[in-house]
Each structure stands twice: as structure tokens, then as C-alpha cells.
Image: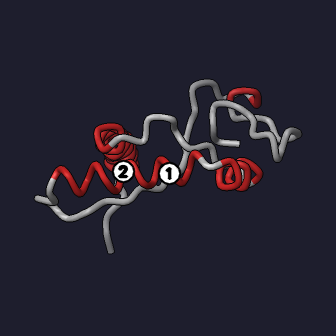
Amino acid sequence: MTSLKRIPSEPGIPTFAESGVPGYEATNWHAMIGPKGMPDAVVERVANEVRNIVARKDVSGTLAKSGVFPESDGTPERVRELVRKDYDQWRKVIIQAGIKAQ
């Protein structure tokens, strides 16, 4: 389990930290990303609609059963933070490992 905490659908699978690798986290996330220059009003409307859909009990329940736990703050700013964080994290790994595009 590469998240920082166990997921309810797989309670018997320990996290990396519980297995002796503290601080390790590698998660996936999903986001809607539009083209550069998209009007702020459109960005906010799409973000609000997605938040409303994800907040529905039937949707959030289905997601939770799959181990997907949407962030409560799914704002455009938060998505930018996630992209930047992952970019910086994995860029460092790629450089240190000497990985090259082929």
C-alpha cells in the first residue's frame, strides 16, 4: 500500500511505513485539466460541478469501495499544487536514476 494509511477495502494490506519504509508515499490522482487561457468562470464552473458530483453519497460510496478518497478541496489551485508536487518529486527520481526517454 503506497498511501500513508490503509484503505478500508483492503484492511489487511500494510502501508510501506508499516512495512519498514517510513515516509514513502506514491499515490495516483485524477483531475480535469483544460487548455491554457481557459476563462476563470469556466474553470470554476467545471470545478464546482465535479465537486458536487463527487460529494453525492452514491458516487463517494462507490469511490470509497475502490479505495478512492477525493480531496475535500478539489479547487483548481489544489490541482496545480498536486501537479507541481508530483512533477518535482518524480523529476528528482528520474534524474537520480538516470532515466532517459527512448
Q: Amino acid at mark 2?
A: Ala
The image shows residue 1, relative to residue 18, as above or below, that is below
Residue depicted at 77% across the width and 51% down the height: 65
Q: Nearer the viewer, residue 26 or 74?
A: 74
* Residue 15, percent from left and from top: 73, 35
* Residue 51, percent from left and from top: 47, 47
Q: Nearer the viewer, residue 71 or 97?
A: 71
Tag on residue 21? none
Residue depicted at 33% across the width and 75% down the height: 102
* Residue 97, percent from left and from top: 40, 49
Q: Nearer the viewer, residue 57 or 94?
A: 57
Of the two numbered discs 1 and 2 on the same chain, state the one appearing first in sequence: 1
Tag on residue 29? 1
The Cα–Cα distance between marks 1 and 2, rounded to whole angstroms, is 15 Å
Would you say 75 lies left or right of 43 here? right
Q: Amino acid at mark 1?
A: Trp
- Callout 1: few (<14), some (14-19), or many (20+) C-alpha neighbours within 10 Å? few
Q: Nearer the viewer, mark 1 or mark 2?
A: 2
Identify the residue position indicated by label 2 in the image.
47
Q: Quadrant of residue 10?
A: top right
Would you say 49 lies left or right of 63 here? left
Count the marks: how many? 2
